[in-house]
């Protein structure tokens, strides 16, 4: 199957094979926000990523209640907005909002309590939140946070037919050179980009051989050696030197959230908003939150 032509796709030498796809599942979080979720807490293939949530609705009732104050420990989150607005506030006194095309990054470290509240905008809400795991040695680091406004995110051409890449986090090989996103301090060398392919376009992105690679299809469809992959699916790729992406030859092309990062290869213990390395550490996080010392 690796080199078979199917749906106009033939995998190039050195390109990573598509290992499997995972469909997103309808869920709810916060104060009843409707989301589509792909969780990979128990899958080494996802590492260093843990979970991807997509919020997509034109009905404000699906998201306007937002995410009131809640705690985290042991992870980083990265929120990226295609449309709409989110405001962040936390116990450190940080406050900021990003709108369409912007991102917010938060390192929970040893403990943070924050809220994420959406605003209303024409066209409704469409965005993502990633959970990124932290190495055991860094899980009790000082928490921090920053906004990344849309104008700060580099947008580069991938071909001469309109395909583009927006660099949100990490480093990417584009145009024959290394390009850095505004966020380069994410855990485990985590890198995130928004790739928008013109109809029928094909691109090849060199990526570090030691990194895990995931792609979420949020618009249109991809042609792959395993058939056509429609939006709402997360794809996990195997070993190789590059990521080959081909949009179906349809009017809307493809919109892709592309991720790569260094696998942590450490135990994962997860309960609600806490991600640590053992059940004992989770229990300690719960005790710390309940007695008011999570953020000390």
Image: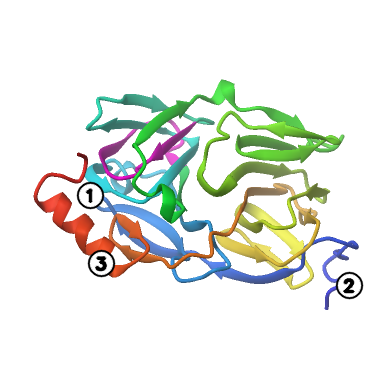
Question: Is 108 covered by the magenta stretch?
Answer: yes
Judged left or right of residue 247, residue 32 is: left
x%, y% of residue 242? 80, 54
Q: State how far apart marks 3 and 1 are (Cα).
A: 28 Å
Residue designated by label 3? 280
Image: magenta residue range: 103-126
Question: Is 59 covered by the magenta stretch?
Answer: no
Between discs 3 and 2, the one toward the N terminus: 2
Residue designated by label 2? 3
The residue lying at 25 percent from left, 25 percent from top is: 93
- Between circles 3 and 1, the one closer to the viewer is 3
The single residue placed furthest to the bottom in the displayed view is 1
The residue lying at 20 percent from left, 39 percent from top is: 296
Looking at the rendered structure, the secondary structure element under dot 3 is: helix
Secondary structure mostly taken by the magenta-highlighted segment of the chain: strand
x%, y% of residue 127? 47, 43
* Label 3–label 2 contact, CB within 8 A: no
The residue lying at 61 percent from left, 44 percent from top is: 191
Q: Quadrant of residue 87?
A: top left
Judged left or right of residue 143, residue 231 is: right
**29 w.r.t. 63: above or below:** below
Residue 163 visible here: no
The residue lying at 73 percent from left, 36 percent from top is: 164
Between discs 3 and 1, the one toward the N terminus: 1
Circle 2 residues within 10 Å: few <14, some 14–19, many ≥20: few
x%, y% of residue 32? 25, 53
- Between circles 3 and 2, the one closer to the viewer is 3
Q: Quadrant of the N terminus?
A: bottom right
Looking at the rendered structure, the secondary structure element under dot 2 is: loop
Question: Between residues 129 and 54, which one lies in front from this camera angle?
Answer: 129
Q: State how far apart marks 3 and 2 are (Cα).
A: 47 Å
């Amino acid at each position: 199957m690796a080199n078979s032509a199917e749906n106009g796709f033939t995998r190039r030498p050195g390109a990573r094979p598509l290992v499997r796809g995972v469909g997103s599942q309808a869920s709810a979080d916060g104060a009843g926000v409707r989301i589509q979720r792909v969780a990979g807490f128990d899958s080494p293939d996802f590492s260093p990523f843990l979970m991807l949530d997509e919020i997509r609705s034109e009905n404000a009732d699906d998201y306007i209640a937002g995410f009131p104050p809640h705690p985290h420990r042991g992870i980083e989150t990265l929120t990226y907005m295609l449309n709409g607005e989110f405001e962040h506030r936390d116990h450190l006194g940080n406050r900021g909002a990003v709108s369409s095309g912007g991102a917010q990054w938060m390192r929970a470290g040893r403990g943070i309590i924050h809220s994420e509240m959406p605003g209303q905008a024409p066209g409704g809400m469409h965005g993502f939140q990633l959970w990124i795991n932290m190495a055991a040695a860094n899980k009790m680091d000082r928490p921090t946070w920053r906004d990344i406004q849309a104008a700060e995110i580099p947008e580069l051409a991938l071909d001469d037919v309109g395909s583009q890449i927006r660099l949100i986090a990490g480093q990417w090989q584009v145009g024959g050179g290394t390009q850095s996103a505004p966020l380069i301090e994410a855990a485990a060398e985590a890198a995130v980009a928004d790739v928008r392919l013109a109809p029928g376009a094909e691109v090849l992105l060199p990526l570090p051989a030691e990194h895990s690679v995931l792609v979420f299809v949020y618009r249109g469809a991809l042609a792959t050696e395993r058939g056509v992959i429609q939006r709402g699916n997360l794809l996990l790729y195997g070993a190789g030197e590059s990521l080959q992406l081909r949009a179906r030859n349809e009017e809307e092309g493809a919109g892709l959230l592309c991720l790569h990062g260094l696998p942590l290869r450490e135990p994962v213990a997860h309960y609600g908003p806490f991600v640590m390395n053992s059940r004992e550490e989770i229990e300690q996080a719960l005790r710390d939150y309940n007695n008011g010392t999570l953020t000390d």
